[in-house]
Image (spheres, helix red, strand yellow):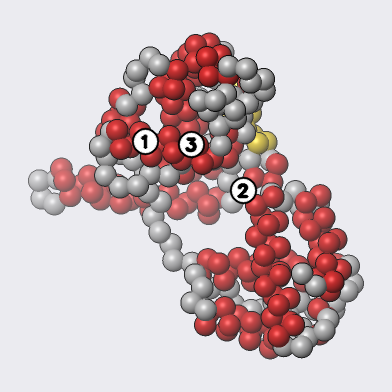
Amino acid sequence: MSKLFNNYTHSYFAYLQIEKNSSVHTIKNYRDDLEQFFMFMNEQHIKKVEDVTHQDARLYLTGLHAQKMARASVSRKISALRGFYRFLMREEIVMENPFLIVHRPKGTKKLPSFFYEEEMRELFETVQETDALSIRNKALLELMYGTGIRVSECTGLTLTDIDIDLGIILVRGKGGKERYVPFGSFAAEAVQSYVELSRPTLMKNANHSMLFVNYRGGPLTVRGVRHILTELIEKASLSGKIHPHMLRHTFATHLLNNGADMRTVQELLGHTSLSSTQMYTHVTKEHLQKTYMKHHPRA
C-alpha cells in the first residue's frame, strides 16, 4: 500500500489497538476498508485526506452500491471511515468529517436461528458415549449452551478461568472486557468429567493451560468447534445447518421463553447495548405464535 496510506493509518491502528482495545479481527477489517478507500482516492486523484469532501464520500458510497455489496458490508465501511476521520479531527489533521452525514444503509434483520428444547435433547443424546472425544464434546456442548458464551470466548478459556465448585467462569469478551458467567449442575458435571478423565488423555505430550483441546492435545480452535457441532447435528439427524452461535442464540431464547428478564440476559451475554439483546424478543414472539397455532383449539 502507498506511503500516503501508511503515513495516515499507522497511528490510527495503534489508537484502535491501545486506546479502543479493538480486536485483531476488527482492526484487520478496518485496514481492508481503509485500503479500499485510499485506492478510490488514488483513482480520483485526491492527494490528501483533508481534500476529501462530502461529495467524494457520496461518490464512494455510490460505487459500493454499484458493486452490489451487502448492506452490512457497506455499513461497516462507512463506520470505519467515520471513525478514521473522527480520529483525524482529534489529531487536528482535518477540520471536518466528510462521512458524518453519509447515510448508512440499514441491514436486513434476520431472526437468529436457535434450537428448540427437544432438539437440544437430541443433540445431547449424541455425546453420551464414554470415549475421550465424546466426554470432551459433551462438556463443550453443555458449557456453551449453559452459559451462552461466544465460541471465541469458549476456545479462549483456560483451566484457571473456570471454578467448578462455584459454578462460574471468567469470560474475556469483545474489546478485552471481562465478565463472570454462572453455569448449572449439568455443565459442572460434564466439565469436571472432561478435566479429570478426558483432557489428560487428549493432552498426550502437550503442555498448556487452555481448557478445551483437540484430539492431538493442542488448543481447540473456532474452526474445530464448528466441525464438532456439524458432526453432532449430523449424528442427531437434525435438519439444517449448525453454527456455534446458534447455541448462544438458543441460550438467550430459552432464558426469555422461561421468564428471564431482558437486563439479566443482556449481562449474561455481555452485550453493551440492550438493543443487541432485544432481537431475541422477536424470536420468542415467533415461538409463542407457533406454540399458540399448534395447541390452541381455536387457532
As displayed, is residue 192 above or below residue 136? above
Instruction: Judge by depth and name the residue closer to the eye, 10 or 83.
Output: 10
Residue in the picture at 20% in, 47% down: 292
Could you tell me residue 244's position as x and y percent? 46, 41
Left or right placement of residue 185 versus residue 29 in this view? left
Left or right placement of residue 295 versus residue 1 in this view? left
The residue to which callout 1 is attached is 231
The residue to which callout 3 is attached is 225
Residue in the picture at 56% in, 14% down: 200
Amino acid at pointer 2: Thr
Left or right placement of residue 46 versus residue 125 in this view? right
Residue in the picture at 41% in, 36% down: 229
Query: Residue 163 falls in which quadrant of the image?
Result: top right
As displayed, is residue 13 above or below residue 139? below
Query: Residue 237 falls in which quadrant of the image?
Result: top left
Residue in the picture at 51% in, 41% down: 223
Amino acid at pointer 1: Glu
Instruction: Judge by depth and name the residue closer to the eye, 8 or 293.
Output: 8
Marks 1 and 3, the one that precedes in the sequence: 3
Q: Extreme left residue here?
A: 297
Measured in 3D between alpha carbons, the distance from the residue under mark 2 to the one under mark 3, in whole angstroms, is 25 Å
The residue to which callout 2 is attached is 272
